[in-house]
Image (cartoon, rainbow, N blue to C red):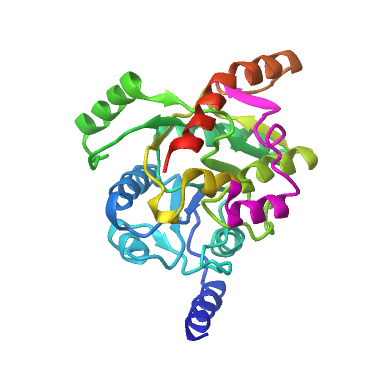
Amino acid sequence: MAQVSRQQEQTDRAAGLRTVCHAPVTLFALPKPFTGQAQRIQANAISSWLRLRPAVDVLLLGGEEGIEEFAEQSGAFYGGNVRRNEHGTPLVSSAFEIAHQVSTSPILVYCNADVILDRGFVRALEQLSEHFLDNGNDFLAIGQRTDLKVEQLVDFANAHDVEALKDHCKQSGQLSSAVCKEYFAFRRTQYRSIPPFAVGRGNWDNWMVAHAHRSNFQVIDLTPAVLAIHQSHDYTHALSSRMACYVNGDEARENQRLAGGRNLLSGSTCSHELRDGMVKPIGLLKRTCRTIGDIPRFSKLLVQLLVQK
């Protein structure tokens, strides 16, 4: 009970935080503890985000080991702890609430803390801003990730390191299935309140997209414009298998209940794409062809879910 009280105290304090993020974009995340391989992976990802300043403010949330210290050392903002479920897992809904409270940015982006982004991400969001913010239309922007094993710290201030990473990605990176979504960009007037999903578990990401379709938001595919490098990792942080994290574990099933189902197809398809600086509709035939073309990647993902610990 004392632990719950301390957590609530931290969460209540976070709710009263002053507004700190004022860039055109606030990118927020719920990192894992900064231990083991997660320390290197998250340092790489967040360092790449910080290179996007001044267009982007980076907001780190959660009470896990090392998050506040890394924010202080790196120049990111720290937004405090978040609410948790009965298993002690941070809730995505709490992170969204805090991000809305401490940011005035017209665009918010939730991103998983193992994903490296480059300047193409900023250019894409600038183009979306020009298209959507002036006319007041709502949107959700997502994109496919490229899976890559990155085994060292990357100095993003060093051009040689950055080029070496890009070369490594060209040679060894694998585009993942469309069901794997790593970031969500939207207007700050959207997603102020979402169900209490557990972070790092299945089904909540599909809900984000399915909800956008039901709400008649334009769902924009940024894959042609944005390279999102997902650094491969194990799932020991969850004390369970990858299958349990995303499909049949208690928390994944609870996320599924909150989401009203798995929303596998409606939660993975886009109505538009950003290509050559323009937002263009994706016709039914093209969407169908993309879904069929994604079957080999989806099948590979299913195999990984079955065998990967």
Residue extending farthest bottom: 2
Residue 263 magenta-highlighted: yes
Q: Is residue 118 left or right of residue 37?
A: right
Residue 250 screen position, x and y as percent: 60, 56
Relative to 191, residue 289 above or below: above
Is residue 111 something one can see in this rendering?
A: yes
Q: Is residue 70 above or below residue 201?
A: below
- Give the residues drawn in magenta, as a range: 248-276
Is residue 144 visible to us here?
no
Left or right of 175: which side holds 277? Answer: right
Q: In the image, 125: left or right of 158? A: right
x, y percentage for residue 106? 60, 49
Q: Between 90 and 109, which is closer to the camera in this rendering?
A: 90
Q: Horizontally, is 268 left or right of 277 in the view? A: right
- Image coordinates of residue 113 in percent, x first then y, are 42, 48
> Residue 74 in magenta?
no
Q: Is residue 65 above or below residue 301?
A: below
Quadrant into which the C terminus falls: top left
Furthest residue in direction front, as rendered: 307
- Residue depicted at x 30% and y 56%: 74
In front here: 71 or 145?
A: 145
Residue located at (62% from left, 25% from top): 273
Task: Tell how many labels.
Answer: 0
Residue 220 sits above or below residue 113 on the image: above
The image position of residue 146, as x and y in percent, is: 43, 29
* Residue at x 73%, y 38% (from the top left corner): 135
Between 224 and 259, the residue placed more toward the observer is 259
